[in-house]
Image (cartoon, rainbow, N blue to C red):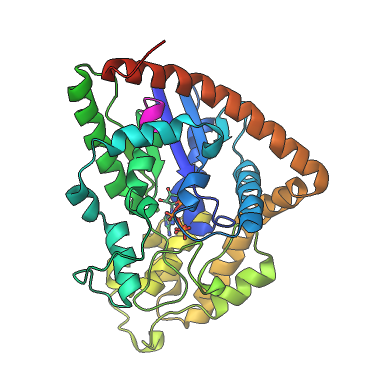
Amino acid sequence: QEVVFSGIQPTGVPHLGNYFGALSQWVEMQNAPGTNRQLLYSVVGLHALTMPQDPKKLYEDRMNTLASILAVGVDPQKAILFFQEDVPQHAELAWILNCYSMMGRLKRMTTWKSKLAVKEGSQSSDIIDDSGLNLGLFTYPVLQAADVLLYRTTHVPVGEDQRQHLELARELAQKMNRVMKNDFFPLPTTIINPAKRILALKGSPPQKMSKSAPDPRSRILITDSAAEIHDKLRVSHTDSIDPESLPEDHIPSLDELSPNVANLYTILSCCTGEDVSTLIPRYYRRRYGYLKADVAAAVDAKIAPIRKEYERLRKPDGEMWLREVAEMGRERASAIATQNLAQIKKHLGINTL
Ligand code: AQP
C-alpha cells in the first residue's frame, strides 16, 4: 500500500509557494481516482519551535494553518490531518534517529548552512559560528525524517527546497533497516511538484517565497484580498530591461528571463494551467505592468474560493470544527504511530512489554 506523508510548519498563513509546491498536491493526491493510498498530512509544530516563537501567536498560527489546509480542499475524512505535536511518537523516533545520524552529514545540509550564513550576515557559509544557534535547528532534518518514517511512508510530496532533507530520510531508512536487520522502512520517494520553487516577489538575489521573510510584501498569502494581491504584484521586482527594446524575432524561454520575471510567468502558469511557452509570447515586449495585472487577476481568481472558506473556518464556530478535526486526526495517526514505534523498539532491543 502507498503511504503518503507531508507536513507544513505553522509559521503563518501559507503563501503561493506552499500552495503550489505542496498543498495543491495534497489535494490532487486525495482526489486521484481509483487509488488505495493512505494520506497523512501534518501541521508540524515541533519544527516551528526551532525558531523563536511567541506562544500566543504560535497557537493562532497552528489553528490558521489547519484552517488553511481545510480551505484548500483537504478532506479530513479522506486524509489523516493532525498536529505533529499531538503524537509524541514523532519526538521519540526523532531521538532514536538522532543516535544514528552523523554530525558531519547534518552540517552539510543547506538549511543549516543558510542559518549560519544569516547569522554571520554574509553569503559565505565557510565562516562557522554556531554558538548562538539551537540544537533543534541542527537536528531539524532528523525530526523530519522521523515524521516520514514513523508511518512507513512510501511517498512524500514536497517543494523543491525539501529535496535534500528527503534524501537524508532515505539514507536513515536504509541505515535503520541494516541496524534492525530487516526491511521495516520502505525508502520514501520524493514527489516534487512541477511548479517547483516559487520565488519571493522582492529581494535580490531572489530567494524562495517564505512565510518568515521580514518583508510581508515579498509573499502572497492564500488569504490575501484582491487589493492586497494587486498591491504586492504592482511593487514586485522585475528587472531594468525595457521590454519594448527587445528583439522581435527571438521569443525567450523561461530560463533566459531574469529570475523575478520568470517567477511571474511561473505563478501565472500555476494559476491558469497554461504552459509558460504559450504565455511568454503574449506578454513579451510589453511593459511589465500588463503581465503583473494579469498575474494579479489570475492569482485572485485562484485563491478567492480558498479565502472565502478560510474566513468561514476562522469564525468562532469554525474553531470547534478545527478542534474536532485535530482530535480525529490525532486518534488515527496515533494508532499507526504507536504500533510502528513498538515494532521499531522491538527491533532495536529497547522493548519491555
Ligand atoms: N517558495 C516555495 N516554492 C515551492 N514550495 C515551497 N514550499 C515552501 N516554500 C516554497 C513547500 O511548502 C511546504 C511546507 O513548507 P514548510 O512550511 O514546512 O517550510 P518551509 O519550506 O521552510 O516554508 P516557508 O514558507 O519558507 O516557511 P518558513 O519561512 O517558516 O521557513 C514544503 O513542502 C515546502 O517544500
How far across and down, in percent of the image, does residue 353 sit?
42, 10
- Occupied quadrant, residue 345: top left
Most distant residue in the front direction: 352
Please say if 308 is above or below 38. Answer: below
How far across and down, in percent of the image, does residue 346 sit?
32, 15
Q: Between residue 288 and residue 100, name the one nearer to us.
A: 100
How far across and down, in percent of the image, does residue 267 sit?
47, 62
- The answer to whether residue 206 is left or right of residue 72 is left
How far across and down, in percent of the image, does residue 104 sit?
17, 50
Q: Tell me, yes or no, whether the highlighted magenta stretch contains residue 103.
A: no
Q: Is residue 269 visible?
A: yes
- The answer to whether residue 9 is left or right of residue 315 is left
Most distant residue in the top direction: 353
- The answer to whether residue 151 is left or right of residue 124 is right
The residue at the point 30 percent across, 46 percent down is: 165
The residue at the point 50 percent across, 50 percent down is: 9
Q: Between residue 145 and residue 290, name the one nearer to us.
A: 145
Q: Quadrant of the N terminus?
A: top left
Tell me where the magenta segment starts and ends, as one range. 148-153
Q: Is residue 251 visible?
A: no
The residue at the point 41 percent across, 26 percent down is: 151
Q: Splitting the image into four quadrants, where does ligand 1 fall?
A: bottom left
The residue at the point 51 percent across, 36 percent down is: 41
- Occupied quadrant, residue 102: top left
Please say if 155 is above or below 105. Answer: above
